[in-house]
Each structure stands twice: as C-alpha cells, then as structure tokens.
Image (cartoon, helix red, strand yellow):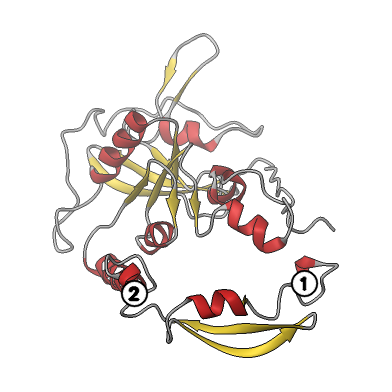
Amino acid sequence: WSDPSDPSKGFDFLYLDAADYNRFPEGTVVARETTVEGKKVYAMDAIIGEGLKSTAGGIGVENLKGSGLIAGETARAYNEVFTLSYVTGRSVGIGAYLNRLGQRVIQMVHGPMILTGFGALNKLLGKNVYTSQDQLGGPQVMVPNGVTHKLVQSDQEGVGAILDWLSFTPKTAWDCSPVLDATDPPEREVGFLPSKVPYDPRHMLAGTRSPDGEWLSGFFDEGSFQEYLEGWGRSVIVGRAKLGGVPMGVIAVETRNVERRVPADPANPA
C-alpha cells in the first residue's frame, strides 16, 4: 500500500514473495527484486502466461486477445447494423463492455452490469465497502447514468421490449422504417387537452384516462408510445411512437419540477 493506514490511497505495486516467485516456471512473470518491510519480494511488471499448460485451454491472459476482437467487432457493427443488448442476468467484464459498445441496452432489474465484482473491489480497498453487485452496476446506477435505455421487470417483459424496439427499426440502413396499418385514424381528434397547471406531457403523447374513466386520446396512436432513457435527463422526455402507423421519434419537454437523487458512493465515505 502507498499508505498502509489508508488503503483508499492505492498501492505502489503488486508483488510475489520469493517462495511464490520460484514456484512458477521462468518467464511466467516479469518482475524486479525489491524489499517490503525488510523482506525480499518480486514486484510484478507483467504477467506473461504464454506457453504454459495452464493456459492451453485459453484461461490465461491470452483470452484478452479474443475479448479485444469481440469488442472491436461490436464497435464496427454499431456503425453498420442495428445493435441491441438485453441484459437478463449478471454481465461481467467484457460482457458489460460489449453492452455499452452496442449503445442500445435493455436491462432486467436483476441483471447488473459490472467490470469487476464487489468482492474483488473490497479486497483491493482492504475493507468491506460494497455489499452487492447492484451498487456497482444495478438499475439504480445504469438507469440514471444513461447506459440503460429501458428497464424491465422480467424476461417476458424484456422480450416484449425487444420486439417493440424492432417494430421501429428498418430492415436495412437503406430501407424505410416499417409502416403498419393505423390502429387510430390519423384524422381523429386529440382528446387530451393541456391545462395551465402542470401536467404530465406523456398524457399528451400517449393519452390517458380521466378521473371518471373516460379515455382521452393523445397525439400518437394508442398504445404505440415507448419511452426510453426515462431515468436520465429527466427534464426531457424521449421515445418512439407511431402516428397513423408511421414510426416517429419523440422529444418533449418536461415542464414540471423534477427531483434527482444521487446516492453516495460507499467507497468515498467523506
């Protein structure tokens, strides 16, 4: 540790003691000899792993090459085709990174996206700071920071959200978005009337029911409005909807006061 009394300040290097260093075949690690508290140790500069029997199955550092190839291909795919990730369970390391590279993310409420598990971080920090993966990449983190576009409560709802998103997506980059038969006639009257007092703009877009149960239609076809990034940039409402069966993008202004809570990071108690 840089300061043994304060692990939060980080460390100078990782090391192997002499017994562990001599246990590995030559060339396994690149290390320099130094001392820690009067004991001879080997500070590691690099972990090689190449050619070892233990890495023959791809479990050593060599598998990072494959991760890099997948990441590069995903980044290129976003510029060429429609990419969408559905996080149904714990997504760790390169899996979480690929979700971000694909840009569009639907997250199930019990599917955190993390680069490193909370147990490993606690060991690195030298104390029990985090108690769950959700503190690192759960919905309470990924929805407000804009990584997750839509949050679902179950896999059935998640599959439905995927199909809804695809219904707005053209077959290729050169095709028009799919136009379906209109569920509402475009020439109909809009039933919802904005008031002078603050109101929910979603009612103007999607429609709502009055206190006496009467349906007040919105601007877009009934049931077609899908909101995305609901927990991020809450002063603006964005989503997709259909008007006369024609897919459209939606941007509206939230005129009401909004409240945002930013939970404290347990790693920064001060």
Image quadrant where one finds the N terminus: bottom right
Q: Nearer the viewer, residue 16 or 191?
A: 16
Q: Residues within 10 Å of mark 2 (few under 14, many from 20)?
A: some
Left or right, 172 with respect to 66, comes to left
Disc 2 target residue? 62
Would you place residue 223 above or below residue 162 in this image?
Answer: above
Disc 1 target residue? 9
* Front label number (1 vs 2): 2
Residue type at mark 2: give it: Glu
Q: Quadrant of residue 211?
A: top right
Horizontal and vertical percent position of residue 55: 33, 70
Identity of the residue drawn at 34% across and 74% down: 62
Q: Looking at the image, is mark 1 or mark 2 earlier in the sequence?
A: 1
Image quadrant where one finds the C terminus: bottom right
- Secondary structure under tag 2 reads loop
Would you place residue 28 above or below residue 141 in this image?
Answer: below
Would you place residue 256 above or below residue 233 in this image?
Answer: above
Numbered badge on residue 65: none
Horizontal and vertical percent position of residue 206: 41, 32
Residue type at mark 1: give it: Lys
**What residue occupies the far top of the structure in this picture?**
212
- Give the CA distance from mark 1 to mark 2: 31 Å
Would you place residue 140 above or below residue 268 in this image?
Answer: above
Q: Residues within 10 Å of mark 1 (few under 14, many from 20)?
A: few
Identity of the residue drawn at 62% across and 84% down: 43
Left or right, 93 with respect to 184, comes to right
Left or right, 83 with respect to 207, comes to left
Horizontal and vertical percent position of residue 234: 59, 47
Q: Nearer the viewer, residue 104 or 198?
A: 104
Horizontal and vertical percent position of residue 266: 73, 52
- Secondary structure under tag 1 reads helix
Q: Quadrant of residue 257?
A: top right
